[in-house]
Structures are given as structure tokens and as C-alpha cells.
Image: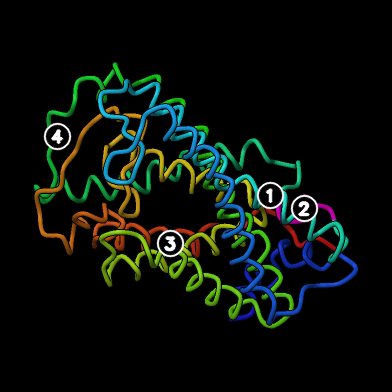
Amino acid sequence: MIDTMFNWITESPLFHLARRGTRLTHWLAVLPLGLAFIFVSSFGAIPVVLAMLVVYGVENGMPSMQGEPALVSGFWMALQLISSFAGIFLFLWLWLKFYEKRPFHTLGFEKNGALLQYGRGLLLGALLFGGAVGLMALFGFVELAQGDPAQTGLAALGGVLLVALGWVVQGAGEEVVTRGWMLPVLGARTRPWIGIVVVSLFFSLLHGLNPNLSALAMVNLALFGLFAAFYALREGSLWGICALHSVWNWIQGNVFGFEVSGTNAGGGTLFKFVETGPDWFTGGAFGPEGGLAVSLMLLLGILVLFAWPRPESQAPVS
């Protein structure tokens, strides 16, 4: 009975897809390689940052973009996100092609149902993060503030939409290396539960140098990793969790105006909300991801995933 309840985890198509190659990466090499893909890819942003320094000059060691319209800051923010994370796709494609010898789509990017899964991920991501903001509002721990008129509301709409392209690449980049490659390979090499736990902790530690990090923020990042793993395994695909991750960050930073994992999102924001309640509930300077409101929504999301009926069309890949 227990095995039947959890066969959507142990028999997920993602594990079957990972075994399609000639060989699987050794489990001891998965974490170092995953870290290397992310780290080396981040160097892609160097030319973008240098260009910004040349154009705008330096202020406190960073490009000075004070007074620039949201459309301009959104363009540069999108460019930074894309250049920082696009390399992950290239490195993984090369690794799969020349070492594991399997096609890139076996990371969970099969065509069947892709549009439906991506759209559902966008909707669920918006509802999940919106629910956390709703919880803060329910207790009076958040309020709408007056932001910079040039960076808030309709004046910022162009930048807000433009930077969404960057979040699409960023969210997918993190998901493809963690839930698309690392989790299925570790799970297929060892046990699915080992892959889930190890990759969730890895995802949390990836953000260990982010500013204003707290203990609860680290817990929430690991909790998001668990939720994302269960979501990908439940769908047997990566389309949905890529969309959810991207829209989560975009709504957090460019719709509600919060910090995203401790960092300020460029490109302006449609609304400017500020936390007025205790940091342990709202997340404080780290943003809502560091607070209990997000913890509760992620736990609710995990419960929903375990109650989510699995369609026959998602039977394991042979």
C-alpha cells in the first residue's frame, strides 16, 4: 500500500528518462558538476556588467543607474539574468551529448502536454506566492507604499514585462540543473528519496551567500527545493516547475516589489508593498522567502501535490 501511494515518486518518468543514456554520471560527481555548471555559467554576466560600468559609471562598486527609467533598468536586468544562466543549458547539453549520450529533452522537456504544463505552472506559481502575500495582509503585516513614480505602476510596465524574459531563463536554468539533471541522476543511481533530499539541500546552500540570509530563509529555500522536486516528479516533466519558479521570482520582485532572495529586482514593479510585521513572518530584508508566510504556503503546496491524482497519461516511460 505504501509503495503504491508513492510510486509517482519512485517510478517517475524523470528517472526512466535519465536511464536512456549510454551511461549515468557517477553519484559522487553529480554535486561538483552541478556546482561547476552554475558557477561557470555565472561568468557570462561579466561582459554585461562591464558594459553597464562603461555606460553608466560606478557608484558604490556597482553600475550607477540612478534615475534611469524602468524600461532601461529592465533591459539590463533581463540581460544579466539571461547571460548568467544561459550557459547552464549549453554545459548540460554538451555533458549529455558527449558523456551520458542522451538527448537534452530527456531532462524532462518532452513535447507532449508541454503548453498545458507550462501554463499550469505559471498559474500555480502566482497562486502560491500570492497566497503568502495574502497571509501577510490578513494579519496586517504588509501594506501598499508609495514607490518611485518612474519605477512603479503603469510607468514601469515596459520594464516589468521585459525583465520577465530574464526570469524565464533564470528559473528554468536553476530547475534544469537541479530537478532536471541532478535529482533524476542521483535518484536513478541511488534511491529517489536520497536524490530529493540531497538536491533540496544543495538548492538551499546555493543561496548561502545571498544578503540578509536568515536561518528560516535557509529552511524555506530547502522547503522550496522539496516542493519543486515533488512537483517535477508528480508531473514527470520539467515544464511546469520551470514556469512556476520563473513566475514566483517575477511576481515577488516585479509585481509586488519585494526583495527576491535578499536581492533587489531591477526593471521596476507594478506595486510597491512593504513588510510591516515581524521578520519571522514576513521575511524582512530577505523578502517573503525568509518568513513563515512562505513556509506555510510551501507546506500547503506539498500537501496538495500528495493529494493530486495522477492521470493515466503520466504512466512511467518504458
Check the picture and name the quadrant holding the N terminus.
bottom right
Measure the C-alpha gap from mark 4 to mark 2: 44 Å
Query: Tag 4: residue type?
Result: Leu
Query: Marks 2/3: CA distance?
Result: 26 Å
Question: Image point 64% across, 76% down: which residue?
Answer: 192
Between disc 1 and disc 3, the foreground one is 1
Q: Which residue carries the number 2 mark?
A: 93
Residue 59 visible from this viewpoint: yes
- 297 is within the stretch colored magenta: no
Which dot marks residue 209?
none
Question: Quick one: label 4 or label 2, which is nearer the N terminus?
Answer: 2
Magenta stretch: give its range. Answer: 103-108
The amino acid beneath tag 2 is Trp
**Residue type pointed to by label 1:** Phe
Q: Is residue 1 visible?
A: no
In the picture, measured across the screen, residue 109 lies left or right of residue 244, that is right
Q: Whole-percent x and y of residue 47? A: 55, 39
Which residue in the protein does label 3 denote?
224
Q: Disc 1 to disc 3, how far (Cα)?
A: 22 Å
Q: Say left or right for 147 vs 106.
A: left
Say which element carries label 2: helix
